[in-house]
């Protein structure tokens, strides 16, 4: 145990002397939490919309007012031809174009079905689906108002079903509250995985690892000495990130922070083990960065940070069993937003513990005390 403590002390001295590592540990949480939480969002707020009103009636103008009042659209009403509308969509000047044909109001007065044409740039399929949903909701609300106005409030279609909606855990549907915990996971993953791996390989490059190789230090003591300092730093960065999430984005802490830190400790042991294992099969920092970047990119995109892993095909979900980020992103949202307890996440703790034991055993086995 004393040997491990000496190794930990040596690592902290080495980290303190490394100006780059010190800055990265302090600045990375600040920059990631301030920039990425705002930037990484699928919210659609300002859809550029073109409206061509060929009817010019009171009914069509009122429909345009409904769209103008929405915070999701930025409206331009222009008298363009069909070819000009197509060209504006093609050049991405507008995301959505709505054409109100002539005779729109007259059809309503004759109790016929009125029609509008919607043209949507669907290069981004998700944005197109959301834009269509917003348009349909506005048109449906206006249609209901027209029907009530023309036929009276007591028609069956206007009062048959009342839907009461209650959003749990994020009642204001604030995307920042959803994203901030996920960004925190990326943060401590980067700190643990990259820093620990590069730290070991740097000793290979400078040759200082030779002094340890000729000493009686056991392999497990060496790996533990490399892992524990970055485990402490990762947990400290998690504290810093949670404070930023609370102060900047008012992320609720519904669950116990002790529960969160228990899982974070197990998670960091697994992630640090991956970083150390990669460093044992690499000879340079560039090799560590390249291999780590490949796996981290895949893990982040499959983690559920942006979309639910349940939407992936079955084979993708099987691959995701080996993705540690998927476990922590799920757990941190459960604990912070839903108030989940240790009992609720015991399966994830057990799986991550098994994962950590396996990768650290591989790192110890692969580390060679040779030049």
Image (cartoon, rainbow, N blue to C red):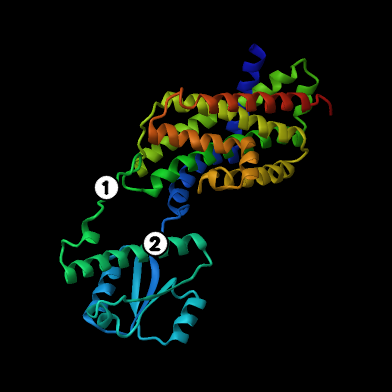
Determine the image quadrant of residue 96. Answer: bottom left
- What element does badge 1 sit on? loop
Q: Name the quadrant containing residue 215.
A: top right
Q: Residue furthest front?
A: 156
Q: Residue 138 placed where, x, y %? A: 31, 65
> Which of 64 and 72 lies nearest the eye of the viewer?
64
Tag 2 residue? 133
- Toward the viewer: 260 or 369? 260
- Within 10 Å of disc 2 (Cα), the crowding (few <14, some 14-19, many 20+) is few
SS for dot 2: helix
Relative to 227, say whether 330 is above or below: below
Residue sitting nearer the eye, 256 or 84: 84
In percent of the image, x 58 and y 47: which residue is there? 312
Is residue 180 visible in this depiction of the protein?
yes
Residue denoted by label 1: 164
- Give the distance between the C-alpha atoms of the residues marked 1 and 2, in whole angstroms: 19 Å
Which residue is outermost to the top? 2
Residue at image point 30% right, 44% down: 166
């Amino acid at each position: 145990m004393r040997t491990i403590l000496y190794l930990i002390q040596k690592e902290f001295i080495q980290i303190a002397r490394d100006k780059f590592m010190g800055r990265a540990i302090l600045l990375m949480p600040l920059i990631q939490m301030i920039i990425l939480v705002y930037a990484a969002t699928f919210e659609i707020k300002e859809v550029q919309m073109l409206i061509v009103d060929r009817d010019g009636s009171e009914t069509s103008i009122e429909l345009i007012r409904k769209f103008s009042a929405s915070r999701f659209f930025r409206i331009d009403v222009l008298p363009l031809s069909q070819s000009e509308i197509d060209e504006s969509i093609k050049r991405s000047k507008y995301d959505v174009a709505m054409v109100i044909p002539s005779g729109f109001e007259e059809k309503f007065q004759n109790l016929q079905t009125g029609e509008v044409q919607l043209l949507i740039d669907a290069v981004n399929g998700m944005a197109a689906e959301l834009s269509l949903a917003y348009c349909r909701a506005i048109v449906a609300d206006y249609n209901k108002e027209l029907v009530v106005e023309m036929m009276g409030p007591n028609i069956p279609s206007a009062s048959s079903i009342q839907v009461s909606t209650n959003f749990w855990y994020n009642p204001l549907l604030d995307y920042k509250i959803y994203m901030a915990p996920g960004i925190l996971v990326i943060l401590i993953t980067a700190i643990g995985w990259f820093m620990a791996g590069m730290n070991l390989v740097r000793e290979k490059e400078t040759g200082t690892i030779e002094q340890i190789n000729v000493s009686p230090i056991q392999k497990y003591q060496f790996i533990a000495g490399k892992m524990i300092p970055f485990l402490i730093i990762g947990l400290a960065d998690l504290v810093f990130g949670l404070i930023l999430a609370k102060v900047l984005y008012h992320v609720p802490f519904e669950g116990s922070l002790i529960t969160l830190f228990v899982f974070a400790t197990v998670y960091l042991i697994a992630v640090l083990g991956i970083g150390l294992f990669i460093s044992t099969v690499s000879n340079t920092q560039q090799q560590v960065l390249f291999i780590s970047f490949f796996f981290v990119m895949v893990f982040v995109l499959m983690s559920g940070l942006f979309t639910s892993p349940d939407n992936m095909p079955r084979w993708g979900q099987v691959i995701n069993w080996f993705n540690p980020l998927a476990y922590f992103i799920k757990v941190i949202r459960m604990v912070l937003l839903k108030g989940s307890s240790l009992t609720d996440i015991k399966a994830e703790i057990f799986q991550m513990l098994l994962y950590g034991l396996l990768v650290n055993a591989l790192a110890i086995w692969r580390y060679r005390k040779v030049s």
